[in-house]
Amino acid sequence: MNKTPLSKFEILQEEISKMIDKTSNSSIQNKKKSFRIYIGISISSALVTFLVAIGGDIPKEWSSTLKVVTLFFSAFSTVLAAWDGFYNHKQLWVYYGDSKNNLKALLLKLRLLSEDDKNNPEMINEIHKEYQAIMNKGNYKWKELRLEDNAD
């Protein structure tokens, strides 16, 4: 197997494609987590409201069980809200989506280069700098979000 070495253009294109896949997967995962947390909080809160409302209308022997179940769902809502406040999956979903879209635009720009530009080290370096800027911006936003969480 005599494999020809990849050109800088091909290496950059491959790296950008990998990062598009990675940021896309991260965006999707954070979207799912955000959705599940919001649905969990909503359902749990609705159950607490319902259980409190029927509390006076149930037989006395079920009163303790109802209180425990109500407290459980109330605590569950609190835990989910704290989890969301710490990890902020919704904001991560947006940040990863933003990075993915910027990387897709950069990949298109790279694919549209003329044959001369594909072999031009200055052009490849320029696009690599744009790639690094996108990655640095995404990393900065992620770090900023983590620091905001710790500052509170």
Image (cartoon, rainbow, N blue to C red):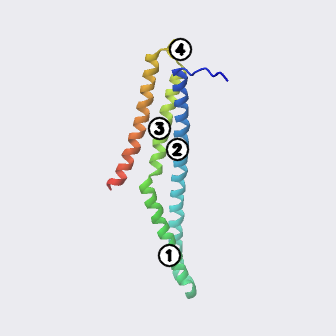
Q: Secondary structure at mark 4?
A: loop
Q: Upstream in the sequence, badge 2 or badge 4?
A: 2
Position above or below: 119 against 49: above
Name the residue that disc number 2 marks: 26
Mark sitting earlier along the chain (1/4): 1
Residue 60 percent location from the top left of the image: 55, 87
Amino acid marked by disc 2: Ser
Label 3 is placed on what type of residue?
A: Asp
State the residue at coordinates (35%, 49%): 147
Camera-nearest residue between 28 and 58: 28
In this rendering, the answer to whether 31 lies above or below 103 is: below
Question: 10 Å neighbourhood of mark 2: few (<14), some, or many (≥20)?
Answer: some
Label 3, residues with CA under 10 Å away: few <14, some 14-19, many ≥20: some
Query: Dot 4, crowdedness within 10 Å: few (<14), some or many (≥20)?
Result: few
Q: Residue 34 location, x and y as percent?
A: 51, 52
- Residue 98 disc label: 3
